[in-house]
Image: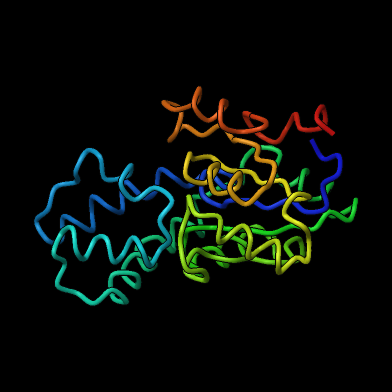
Amino acid sequence: MLKDIDAVIFDLDGSLVDSMWIWEQIDIEYLGRFGIALPDNLQYEIEGKSFSETAYFFKERFQIPDPVQKIKDDWNEMAWNKYSCEVPLKDGADSFLSYCKANNIKLGIATSNSRELAMNVAAVHGLENYFDCIMTGCDVEKGKPAPDIYLAVADALKVDPSRCLVFEDIIPGILAGKAAGMKVCAVEDTYSEGIRAEKKELADYYIEDYTNLTSFY
């Protein structure tokens, strides 16, 4: 898996940390403030969108009266304590990061989440010294499945996209990595277990967690 790889780039939520469960709770609570019930297909509709794109989507779809920035600020506030106290790394992720660092493989994060929450996760788990680049979907023109964020991280790492390996847990992210010309490893996550077969078909590799990655080296 790591042959001819100079950089590993991680999606954050559902790929590097176990956090996807948080957002359904937040969406229910947030929409409830406006007397709106959570639509069954909401997560599918916003999958892959950047934090800003999602806020614009909420404002238009649900006619939220608040400015987009306030929507984002409210979400950050609602999620902050959960990301600080309730979001663990995926099993084996810390050991894999240490392996990459020890073997001079550059590390990046390409997340659709907010910079505030991404940096919070990095600080809580002591990841700042591992990653050479942390980029969000708000830093580029288009969110996933467009390849923009993965190409931007590769550029920041000064690594050719063909020599990058991406870890992703959702279809738009897998498609974004492939569109960027990178190898992609799909990661098992409870949130996306219903599309496991499609993830396996689209990605180059598939793992349940990072504990058994040594068999791929």
User: Quarter of the image holding residue 76?
Assistant: bottom left
Q: Residue at x 77, y 54 (%)?
A: 7
How many labels were placed on the picture?
Answer: 0
The one of 42 and 201 positioned closer to us in this rendering: 201
Point out the image quarter for the N terminus: top right
Front residue of 186 and 191: 186
Residue placed farthest to the top in the image?
A: 197
In the depicted structure, whether residue 114 falls above or below residue 35 = below
Find residue 64 and report its horizontal and vertical position in percent.
16, 67
- What residue is drawn where x is 89% and y is 52%? 102
The residue positioned farthest toward the right in the image shown: 103
What colour scheme does the image use? rainbow
Query: Residue furthest toward the left?
Result: 35
The residue drawn where x is 43% and y is 51% is: 48
Which image quarter: residue 75?
Answer: bottom left
Report the side of 184 relative to 75 (left or right): right
Residue 191 position, x and y percent, is: 43, 35
The image shows residue 52 at horizontal and vertical percentages of 38, 67
Left or right placement of residue 167 versus residue 27 in this view: right
Determine whether 176 is above or below 188 in the image: below
When asked about the image quadrant of residue 133, the answer is bottom right
* Percent position of residue 162, x then y: 75, 49
Q: Residue at x 85, y 34 (%)?
A: 217
